[in-house]
Amino acid sequence: MTAPSSPGLAGGGGDVVVDPRLGARRRAVRHVTRDDPDRRRLYRLILLILVAILALGIVIVLESPILDVDRIDIAGARATEPAAITEVAGISIGSPLLLADLDAAESRVEALPWIEEATVERDLPGGVHIDVVERTPAALVAGGGSTVLVGTGGRVLSGDPAEIPPAVDTSPGFVRVDVGDEPPAVGERIDPALAEAVTLAERLRADPAGAVQAVQLAPLRFELTDGATVELGDASALPTKLEAFRTLYARVDRSCPVATIDLRVPERPVLTREEPCS
């Protein structure tokens, strides 16, 4: 004979049959728990306490002397004093390391005249590393009674070329670009037209090395270190004119002083001397 099934036991189909009274009681308990205001307030209080503990822990970590700035290392600086970089970076010894605004520090350092690029990084547990790339000086710009040193990219690096830092290579000497107006102040940029002349002066500084001492604009001409003048007229066909100048300069006999070299028509250069050569 088969025993009759009882409530709460597995039925003939293998499913669990729950006593309706037990199911109703479970639903009532869940309803009371969900709608109990005291219990909800308790949950909120526990959540607030956990958030407060977390915030306090964060503050303790950020303000801990263990994570203060203990050292600031600077790499790549030659023309710029490390103290000047540290000052403008705005990160001081003893300040919270994790609160340092590295992006803002990079922007401030890159505002220095000589600095082309700056990278500021944390060096845990207590260090800050500042790596800089400095601009290369290109030429002098003179006008209005002032002379400034301009770097590649057209930024004014120094207002007194006589005070160029010793670590900067000044040989061969810089070519001067003569302009009518006073050049921009230190840290500012020159206009695009003057920047092209500075680029030209930088190229002439090294090739031929030491041959040109000044570039004059409108009309375009070179003043050579031996006193001769090279007439170019304007910037048209400039690469051809420069190549003609370099070729002629390498071949000309300078034992007899040269007065002018006319390269306005580069295919037909005209050379004149100060006096007839014997």
Image: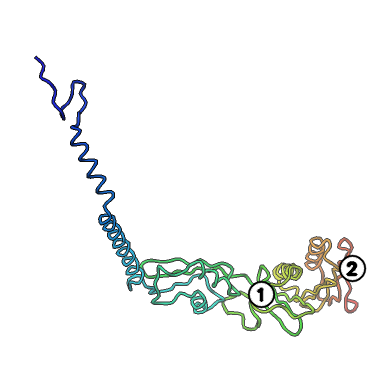
Q: Residue at x 64, y 72 (%)?
A: 137
Q: Calculate the distance from the C-alpha at mark 1 to the C-alpha at mark 2.
A: 40 Å
> Callout 2, which amino acid?
Val
Q: Residue at x 22, y 45 (%)?
A: 29
Q: Earlier in the sequence, mark 1 or mark 2?
A: 1
Quarter residue 21 falls in: top left
* Position in image of residue 276 (x %, y %): 91, 77
Position of the N terminus by quadrant: top left
* Position in image of residue 215 (x %, y %): 78, 74
* For residue 8, side relative to residue 57 (left or right): left
Q: Residue at x 25, y 57 (%)?
A: 38
Mark 2 = which residue?
270
* For residue 62, side relative to residue 219 (left or right): left
* Position in image of residue 3 (x %, y %): 10, 19
Q: How is the image coloured?
A: rainbow
Q: Is residue 105 above or below residue 4?
A: below
Mark 1 = which residue?
188
